[in-house]
Image (cartoon, rainbow, N blue to C red):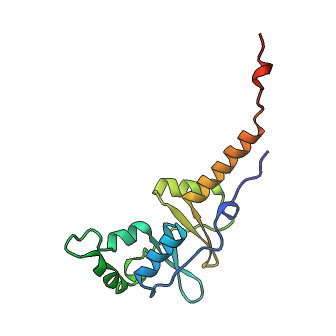
Amino acid sequence: MTPALHVRDLMTAPALALRPLDDLTAALDLMAERHIRHIPIVDGEHDLVGLVSHRDVLRNCLTEQPDVPSFAERPLIEKLKIRDIMTVDVETAAPDTALAEAAGIMLENKFGCLPVVEGGHLVGILTESDFVRFVAGLAADAASRAVSIPASGLRR
């Protein structure tokens, strides 16, 4: 029997995080540089206080304003603070949460991630990408264990 998996077995740790008073360009830059779509927001004690998703950033950027030239967007975005757009009531998981339970929460609520907290402190993040990476690893393991029969062994 396979031992039960927990959030700690798949989560990305440590999670990249920003602060509420960082400007929105910090989130844009971090997402672009690290190819991520979710950024936990923490206070000075590294306690989770919010979450910013790529969708939140896009919703609050001016890219859909045809009368604003692109060179003018960044200075305007720099005036926005993460606290102005972050989600504050964030669903979380603990490192010892069963992976199946965390997956169910994400699927049921259509969440792209769950920040992982322990005693209020951010310790990691569980994302859809973590699940895809895990399944890809399982598929690769299964493929490497598959027995192949050489064509010459298929005689009639």
Q: How many marks?
A: 0
The outermost residue toward the left is: 67
Q: Say which residue appears at 53% left-offset and 57% top-offset.
A: 105
How far across and down, in percent of the image, does residue 127 sit? 56, 62
How far across and down, in percent of the image, does residue 9 sit? 70, 61
Residue 107 in sight here: yes
Q: Please state which of residues 25 and 46 is positioned toward the viewer in this rendering.
A: 25
- In the displayed structure, 155 sits above or below 151; it is above
Q: Is residue 49 left or right of residue 139?
A: left
Q: Please state which of residues 155 and 54 is positioned toward the viewer in this rendering.
A: 155
User: Where, by quadrant of the figure, is residue 45 drawn?
Assistant: bottom right
How far across and down, in percent of the image, does residue 63 sit? 30, 70
The outermost residue toward the front is: 152
Q: Say which residue appears at 33% left-offset and 74% top-offset.
A: 60
Quadrant (top left/top right/bottom left/bottom right) for the N terminus = top right
Q: Is residue 2 left or right of residue 45?
A: right
How far across and down, in percent of the image, does residue 141 sit? 73, 45
Q: Is residue 146 left or right of residue 90?
A: right
- In the displayed structure, 93 sits above or below 83; it is above
- In the displayed structure, 79 sits above or below 27; it is below
Residue 88 in sight here: no
User: Where, by quadrant of the figure, is residue 156 drawn?
Assistant: top right
User: Where, by quadrant of the figure, is residue 116 drawn?
Assistant: bottom right
- In the displayed structure, 102 sits above or below 25; it is above
